[in-house]
Structures are given as structure tokens and as C-alpha cells.
Amino acid sequence: MANYAKDYSLPELMAVSAAREIQDGELAFIGVGMPLMAATVAKYTHAPNFNMMVEYGAVGPSPRRLPMCVNCAVNCERAYYTGSQREVMGAQQAGFVDVACISGAQIDKFGNLNSTMIGDDYLHPKVRLAGSGGANDLASSAGRTIIMMRQDGRNFVEKLDYLTSPGHLSGPGARAQAGLPGGGPQAVITTMGIYRFDEETREMFLEKVHPGVDVEKVKASVKWELQVSPRLGETEPPTEEQVMIMRTLDPLAVYLGNGRALLAGDFEAFMAMLENSWGPMGELMRSKGLL
């Protein structure tokens, strides 16, 4: 029986849920933040032969300090290969990436994402968002995608304000018709639960709710008639080991809490965080035979 943690946060639960989607031997395109935590947990638990690729140009890194952005040199630590952004993006477009983690500001029932703008007028939006970055490429070409996002009652919409990253488009066969080589979204992990996609309709359905979350509250936050699995379950909590791994790499909860606010303007605290994780991460790697 798993030794589940009693002390864990919602972001930690989401990160571990994403980690469980990663299989041993796979190559995943991972960004910094919660996906990095998920990748680290997978690597040090059930998927030791899993490797990640990062936008900075590295393949197979195993950092002992917390990368603070996609262009952070820490992303190259202990990597099998370090190249350029152009090389890794080209490799994923060629079909070498098994799974990728992406997100967005809006999502519809087929897993299509909007990270471009909110409003009816593209030239005069209510909110201008960050845009695609590499998300469209990953959503189009990766073997499958894991979507991670908050669920707040406004962003699970019937119709996107703008389609940035393709999910299953309009339903069965639509991706193939559009010429997209990737398999599309496999799972959506939110602040309320975990969703899958029906094999026939390609429509999202609720598979699991997080502990303490009411199903009716989940339904009320979705703008379409949400399908619920007849075998609806509760999300499996993280284990003590999984929580330990995340907190060893991210001791101030920069990605899984309010650590960014704590570090704001405090360079000495920032450097201390990086230095203090070096030893514990080394011990963790040695215990897993990775160092």
C-alpha cells in the first residue's frame, strides 16, 4: 500500500498527477514550473529511463538546482545533449517527442486551447495574453499532450475566443483531416480534477475529482454539459516520497507556492536557495542511482 502524504498542497497534487501520466522510457518536452516538478517526480520514482527535452536546447538534463526560466543555464545540467532551441523544436516537429505539457487561458470540450487573447475583437481584445510560444507546435506534433490549468468558472468555455493550440479540434477525425501528426490531448489536470477524452466523440469527460471537491461544483464551472465517468473516482494523493522530491528541488515553493513573492528583490535569498538544494539533490540522485 502506498505511503500517502498527509501534508501536501493542491499544486503538489496536480504536479504528481501529471507525473503519473509520464511513462518509463519516454521523451517529454517540459517547461519550467509545475511541469518540471512533474518530470522530476516521474524520473525519480516510476520512470527512471524517462528523459525530458527543454526549450533552451537540452535533452536529458538532471538539474540539482531550480531552473528559473526556459533559458536558464541550469537546464543544461548533466544533459546528454545541449544544442539550440531550433534543434529541439525541429526534433519535436519531426515526431521524436512522446508527451508534452501545455496550458492555456481557455479550453473547450475538445481540448483546444486559447493563450492569445480574451474578447470578441482580435485587434482590440479585453486582455492580450502571452501567445503561443511553442505550445501550438507541441499540441500539433507531440505524441500526446497533458494540459495543466486552473479551473475558475470562466475558462472552460463552449467556444474559444481564439484557437491558439489544437486539441481534438471539432471532434473525431478532425486532427487527421487538418494534417496534424500528433495524437492530441490525453489528460487535462486542473485545480478541481482530472479529465480524459472519449475515444469515439473526442469530448472531454470528468474522470476524477480532487479530494474535497464536489462534483456539482465542477459541473457548474463548465460552460457546456460536462460528461462524467460512470466510474468517477477521487484523485490519488501524492506519496511522502513524491512530496519530498518536489520540496528538495523547490524548497521555497517557487513553482508550487508563493516562493516567487518571497524571493522578490532578495538576491541573497535567491542564491542561498540554489546553493542549499545542491547537496540534498545530490543525495537524492545518488540514492536513485542517477549520480
Image (cartoon, helix red, strand yellow):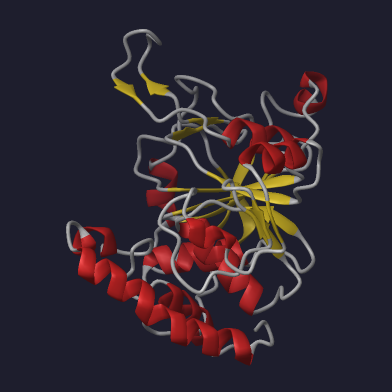
x then y, percent, for residue 75: 54, 59
> Does residue 119 lie above or below 34 as drawn?
above
- Residue placed at 82% from the left, 26% from the top? 176
* Residue 231 horizontal side relative to residue 279, left or right: right
Q: Residue at x 79, y 66 (%)?
A: 25
Mark count: 0
Residue at (43%, 51%) from the top-left corner? 69
Q: Residue at x 46, y 30 (%)?
A: 115
- One can see residue 8 in this view: no
Between 23 and 80, the one nearer to me in the picture:
80
Question: On the rendered structure, is 52 left or right of 134?
Answer: right
Q: Nearer the viewer, residue 290 or 203?
A: 290
Q: Is residue 23 something that shows in the picture?
A: yes
Determine which quarter of the picture holds residue 67: bottom left
| Quarter placement of the N terminus | bottom right
Residue 24: image location, x then y, percent: 76, 69
Q: Quadrant of the C terminus?
A: bottom right
Question: Where is residue 31 drawn, in percent x and y?
Answer: 53, 51
9 in relation to 215, above or below: below
Q: Does residue 270 appear left or right of residue 118 in this picture?
A: left
The furthest residue to the left: 265
